[in-house]
Image: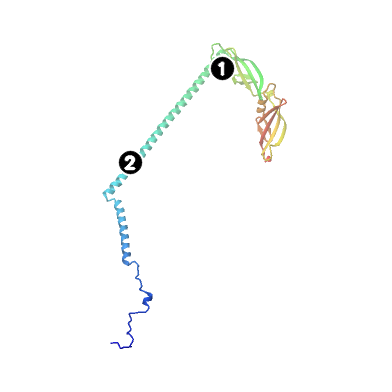
Amino acid sequence: MRQHGSPPPYRPSSSEAEPLIGLRKPSRRPSTRVYAALITSLIVIIMVIIFSVRTCNDPLDPEVRDRIRKEWDIELGQHQQEVLKRDEAHKRWHLEDIERNRLREQWRTEMENHKRDMEERQKQEEEERLRLNMFWTDLESHTCTTYGTREYTARLVNVPSYYNRRVEACMATSVKIHGVEYKPKWCEDHGPDNVIGHWEVDQHEPDCASYWIWYKDFGCMSPGSGQRRIEHYLENIPSGGDWKEFCATTPISFRGMHFTGAQFCFNKDHATWGHWVFDDKSCQ
């Protein structure tokens, strides 16, 4: 029994700081059991997936075997179709090769027959001309046509009125000019007694030889053009000759170059001039 005036007894369960600090909240961290449950669930899901996949592709499963067999049958059918297509293509190519070879052989045979027929025909015509004794008369020279070339004409005689291959006979009958035999370049048929042959002889015709003189160098076409212009005067154009034709066919050589004729021609005051334009590095 407590005496009056004595202090109250000490109780260790009480603390003066408890009202100020308050009670501590319990921890909310997941327990080990939750982790174990999650890991177990994940393992089960993985096993189920693996089992399902293995079950779908298990060759011991009748359904799987049937599916694989059907896939093989489809692939085999596709392969057989491709083989058939290749075989058909090879057969078609082979037939095309046979047809090409046949056409080539037919063409060769036709060409040989045509050549043989032409040779036989020419032989017969030659024999007929010799038998009829066709020959040229009234050989005449005419004006110069181009550089070093003159035209000649003659008339074919002893041509029977019934002969219907007069042009062929004209083209096949030679004439001797300057000691050389030439066949006509073209023929005109004006009737049995008026078959005219035309020749263009480009040998031994000095009177038809024009030439270039008065070399003139006009320098570069323009600064940096890389081209130079040369001019010549054309001399000895035959009387009655075409100045344009002689200008274009009269050859010339200069500065280490050869030309068969002028590149540009013009006529001024009855004089013919030729121009040449060519590359020159000194004009660059």
Q: Secondary structure at mark 1?
A: helix
242 or 259, which is in the foreground? 242
Q: Is residue 206 left or right of residue 43?
A: right
Q: If the image is split into quadrants, where does the N terminus sit? A: bottom left
User: The disc labelled 1 sits on which kind of residue?
Assistant: Val
Q: Is residue 50 left or right of residue 169?
A: left
- In the picture shown, does residue 133 fall above or below 223? above
x and y percent of residue 247 in the render? Answer: 67, 27
x and y percent of residue 35 in the render? Answer: 33, 64
Q: Decide if residue 125 is in sight here.
A: yes
Q: Residue at x 70, y 32 (%)?
A: 231
- Marker disc for residue 77: 2
Residue picked out by circle 1: 167
Q: Residue furthest top?
A: 161
Quadrant housing residue 202 = top right
Q: Is residue 44 left or right of residue 263?
A: left
